[in-house]
Amino acid sequence: MTAKLAVFISGNGSSLQALIDAIRMKVLAARVEVVVSNREEAFGLVRAQKAGIPTRHHPLSPYSEAGRPRSEYDADLARIVGEYKPDWIVLAGWMHILSRAFLDRYPYRVVNLHPALPGQFPGAHAVEDAFAAYRRGEIKQTGCMVHLVPDEAVGAGPVIGTTEVPIYRTDTLETLRNRLQQAEQVLLVQSLQRLIVGDEEIEEEGEES
Ligand code: GAR
């Protein structure tokens, strides 16, 4: 079975690229059906187009400027994505928090990549926050995780995988960010493969009984 992915991005798309490469190398049994970005200038959209993947731009500003609630943006997002019938929604550097208007349409089907370990540094500035905590002597290492997003809580939900990442005395924010991103790319591919294999096993059990 080839799993159908919808990948949400907001920026550079290095984790999207890792998925594209893993699929090409046949280490991930999936296909990216669509890449959605809230930002038109996101470089990840160029990566998707180069790989022949359909892209959609879904900006928040027309909604906020018209005073429309976030739930309408999220409901429209779910409608756009629904056209591609994805098995999994992958948040690979998606910088919006999804509300129930989206999540209720995809229960336990939204996978988030986050550059911190469970229970540490939620939100959009996790790497900066970890680096500052290291400088204050509060932590010696950080890490990344892949987890499911069951509701609106940031960073919550069943954890699929984690990787610890060391912080060195000589690190700058940029060297730490690069090390984390390399770990994230491997972890994202492994975690998705685990979820996809899990689906196949459930299907096979259904066939046997
Ligand atoms: C990744 O490090 C991802 O974990 C992070 O944004 C980066 C996107 O990089 N996501 C979050 O912080 C979500 N809270 P990319 O666009 O190069 O894949």
Image: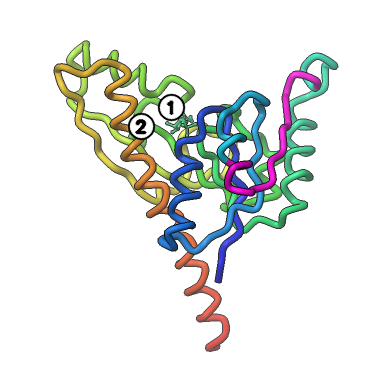
Point 35% across, 47% down: residue: 186
- Numbered disc 2: secondary structure: loop
Q: Quadrant of residue 11?
A: top right
Determine the residue located farthest toward the front in the rendered image.
50
Q: What residue type is labelled 1?
A: Pro
On screen, residue 7 versus residue 175, left or right, reads right
Residue placed under numbered mark 1 in the picture: 122
Indicate the position of residue 80 as horizontal and vertical percent values.
77, 44
What is the CA distance from the residue labelled 2 to the residue labelled 1? 7 Å
Determine the residue located farthest toward the top in the rendered image.
136
Indicate the position of residue 95 as horizontal and vertical percent values.
56, 27
On screen, residue 19 versus residue 49, left or right, reads left
For residue 116, the mark is 2
Indicate the position of residue 132 as horizontal and vertical percent values.
29, 13
Q: Which amino acid does label 2 sit on?
A: Ala
Q: Give the range drawn in magenta.
A: 48-62
Q: In which quarter of the image is residue 36?
A: top right
